[in-house]
Amino acid sequence: MLKALEEISNRFSPILLEEMEAVKLMNRIDTKYFAHVELLIPLLEKMTEEYFIQEINGKRIAQYHTLYMDTADSEMYLAHHNGRKVRQKIRIRDYEESNLSFFEIKNKNNKGRTKKKRVKLENTDFHHNGQVLELMDKYAKYKIEGLIPQLENFFNRITLVNKNKTERLTIDLNLKFHHLQTKAWSDLSKLMIIELKQDGNFRSHAKEILFALRIHPNNISKYCIGSVLTNPELKNNRFKSKVSLINKIINN
């Protein structure tokens, strides 16, 4: 599959990192999907004409690492589990190819829109970073001293941008989770998670292709699923059916 993935990714016209500023979509509507990774090549084959592929330093498949913060009693996880519409995620994301790290706050409102605020990190001492503390004061309901690292994940990402530059499609592959408190690992390398990010709910070529491949919208949070799979102490009733569906997909 690796060779086929390389071949198909080379058929896309590239969009460079500096050009991505026009499609940052920090205030957006996200539509999420997940499917078996065997559908990746058929999906990409249908998108080569209408989409650019992000290229960084000559690479079209990027490596990501994310560190999720939460309170000691996992308040942010439980807000999602308990169905709260308004919620937050706080994380550090490392972009390996560009050698960049950001401290990020994602706020989801009751209209389903995600607003992301972030500051660039120059080192790992974010607890004493003035920009991080200012960001927390403005946009977070938590204090930095009340948060601990809970979960990290590792994955590869393909980022596509439509030719009108009004939407991005990210495809996450080779997902692995590591819980920093329980020390447990989980491997979801047979699953791909797709996110369509738009500044409005308009007609999308990507949506039509996904529908044709019988890949339907299905909300999924990498933080929540990774937490459930690596921390058996967490309340998880709301996510049991999601985990069951994931297992059915990857074992089929």
Image (cartoon, rainbow, N blue to C red):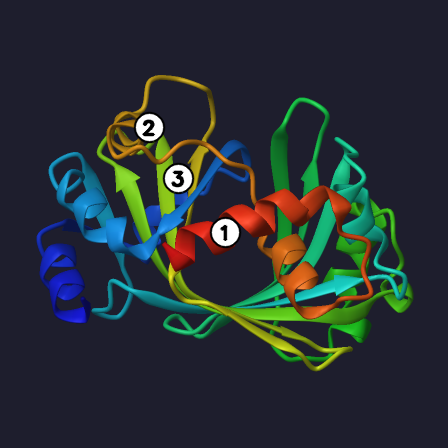
Say what amino acid the circle numbered 2 marks.
Answer: Lys
Vertical side of 74 occupied by 43: above or below: above
Answer with mark 3 or mark 2, whichever residue precedes in sequence. 3
Q: Nearer the viewer, mark 1 or mark 3?
A: 1
Asked if residue 34 shows in the view, the reply is yes
Q: Residue at x 41, y 57 (%)?
A: 250
**In the visual, does 131 lie left or right of 201?**
right
Q: Residue at x 38, y 47 (%)?
A: 35
Q: Residue at x 36, y 54 (%)?
A: 252
Write down the quadrant of residue 69 in the picture. Answer: bottom right
SS of the residue under disc 2:
helix
Asked if residue 221 shows in the view, the reply is no
**In the visual, does 52 lie left or right of 114?**
left
Answer with mark 1 or mark 3, whichever residue precedes in sequence. 3
Q: Nearer the viewer, mark 1 or mark 2?
A: 1
Which of 239 and 40 lies nearest the eye of the viewer? 239
Q: Which residue is mark 1?
A: 246
Q: Which residue is mark 3?
A: 23
Q: Which residue is mark 2?
A: 207
Marks 1/2: CA distance?
Answer: 21 Å
Say what amino acid the circle numbered 3 marks.
Answer: Val
Residue at the extreme top of the image, as rendered:
202
Instruction: List x then y, in percent, for residue 134.
Output: 80, 56
